Amino acid sequence: MAPLFTVPISSTGGSIVCTNPSAAPEHATIYVLTFSSPPDNRLTPIFIDAMLLALDIIEHRYPKGVVVTTSGIVKFYSNGLDLDIVAQTEGFLENWLWRLFRRFLTYPMPTVCLLNGHAFAGGFMLAMYHDYRIMNPDRGFVCVNELEFGVPLQTPMMSIFREKLTPTTFRNVVLEAHRFGGRAALQAGIVDAVGGAQEALALIQERKLQTKAATGIYGTMKEEMYSRVLSGLDDHEGNLKWRENVETTNESVKKRGLQAVQEFEKNGKAKL
């Protein structure tokens, strides 16, 4: 299939290529965005700008339908953020990452994430911000592994899992950094099916997703459905203030606890 359009990812020599699954008329409103940004599709500012542009082109230049995202790199859907670039980029979260998450959360057409390989951390979050997920049953894991290297998750990173997963799965994702293969992810309710492109097409056709955006309120319905997540994405300063208040309370709790321990030790570890 000849591409409908291509958006370059200049920082890595990669690109996002938009195609239809086939030349069949029934596939004309299924838009497959295949991204390749070596080596592992990190969510950098330039990658995010390219993805946002691709979504804008589909919305404003093509008939309403369904958007499928997948990776042209066999091993990875996305390996998440590049922490060095994040540290060097002022306002990365609110000016890039939250915008990307918000766009998928409220996109005015159904979105399907076709997970061909690993989706770690931010890559897993991006997958969760899609409406539907299909995962390779034999290759790749989804995992939020920030616990393992000491990076706390901010509100928009947490809230999408809280909204879409059961409490037990949410706990296992966040507090155990559990790695889910395709079949385990299906059993846990993280993905809607296992398979590849054919299974993604089957899901689209079985659920009649190509017609869902026709009335023009699909995005509005999602805004109402996920209002709590949307509020977190739109209130970056409020999220930081909430964290600051929590940390202040934590310091008070820690101080009182330490004083209690010191008093206990001072009194010769007498019974409380």
Image (tube, rainbow, N blue to C red):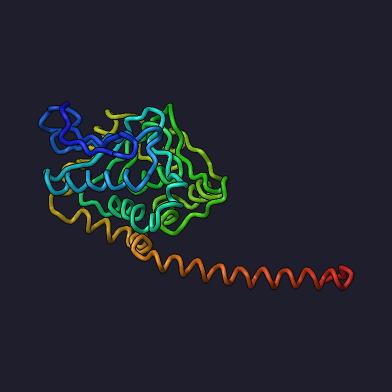
Q: Residue at x 81, y 73 (%)?
A: 263
Q: Is residue 205 at least partly visible in the picture?
A: no
Q: Quadrant of the C terminus?
A: bottom right
- Total residue callouts: 0
Q: Determine which quarter of the picture holds residue 246.
A: bottom right
On the image, the x and y values in percent for residue 191 come to: 38, 40
**Residue 254 left/right relative to 195:** right
On the image, the x and y values in percent for residue 46 come to: 32, 45
Q: Residue at x 75, y 72 (%)?
A: 259
**Residue 225 left/right relative to 149:** left
Out of 9 and 205, give the one closest to the viewer. 9
Q: Residue at x 84, y 68 (%)?
A: 265
Q: Quadrant of the N terminus?
A: top left
Q: Determine which quarter of the picture holds residue 194.
A: top left
On the image, the x and y values in percent for residue 188 come to: 45, 42
Q: Is residue 47 at least partly visible in the picture?
A: yes
On the image, the x and y values in percent for residue 147 come to: 56, 48
**Residue 223 left/right relative to 162:** left
